[in-house]
Image (cartoon, rainbow, N blue to C red):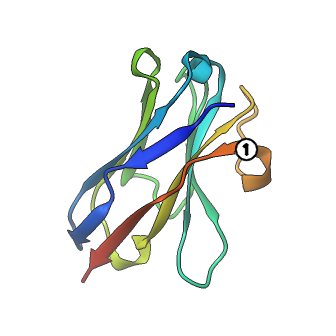
Amino acid sequence: QVQLVESGGGLAQAGGSLRLSCAASERTFGAYDMGWFRQAPGKERTFVALITWSGSWTMYADSVKGRFTISRDNAKNTVYLQMNNLNPEDTAVYYCAAGPPQRLAVRSDEYHNWGQGTQVTVSS
């Protein structure tokens, strides 16, 4: 199974930016759709963004649309989440996940491999 490792989290001020990365352990990374989810304290894990295996389709939660951009580099087995204009409501642990191709899945139970998560904290 593909192993995923997130990085790039940290502390940002409101209006600032962070770029998350998720590195996969296998060359089969290119066969999976990839998603980003987040979980704030005391809340459920929610969908943030996804990108299809080829990079041809992306989807975003309404709360991040226009501020976040998901991308991938299959040659580097890595998916990215560029987060701009951050606000305190974006504070959460961010997880990347691998899922079946072309499913456009937005539910967490549709993804079969998860990273350990990276903390993002946005101060006002």
Q: Secondary structure at mark 1?
A: loop
Q: Nearer the viewer, residue 56 or 3?
A: 3
Q: Is residue 63 left or right of 121 when viewed as pictured?
A: right
Circle 1 Cα neighbour tier, 10 Å, few/some/many (<14 / 14–19 / ≥20): some
Q: Which residue is mark 1?
A: 111
Asked if residue 42 is positioned above or below residue 20 in the image, the reply reads below
Can residue 60 be seen? no
Q: Name which residue type carries label 1.
A: Tyr
Please name the residue shown 27% across and 55% down the image. Answer: 18
Can residue 57 be seen? yes
Asked if residue 53 is positioned above or below residue 97 in the image, the reply reads above
Q: Is residue 107 left or right of 6 when viewed as pictured?
A: right
Q: Nearer the viewer, residue 34 or 59?
A: 34
Please name the residue shown 27% across and 62% down the image. Answer: 85
Q: Position of residue 93 (x, y in %)?
A: 48, 66
Q: Is residue 82 left or right of 48 when viewed as pictured?
A: left
Q: Position of residue 11 (x, y in %)?
A: 25, 69
Asked if residue 103 is positioned above or below residue 60 in the image, the reply reads above
Q: Position of residue 30 (x, y in %)?
A: 57, 19
Q: Position of residue 84 (x, y in %)?
A: 28, 56
Q: For the C terminus, give its image quadrant.
A: bottom left
Q: Quadrant of residue 41?
A: bottom right
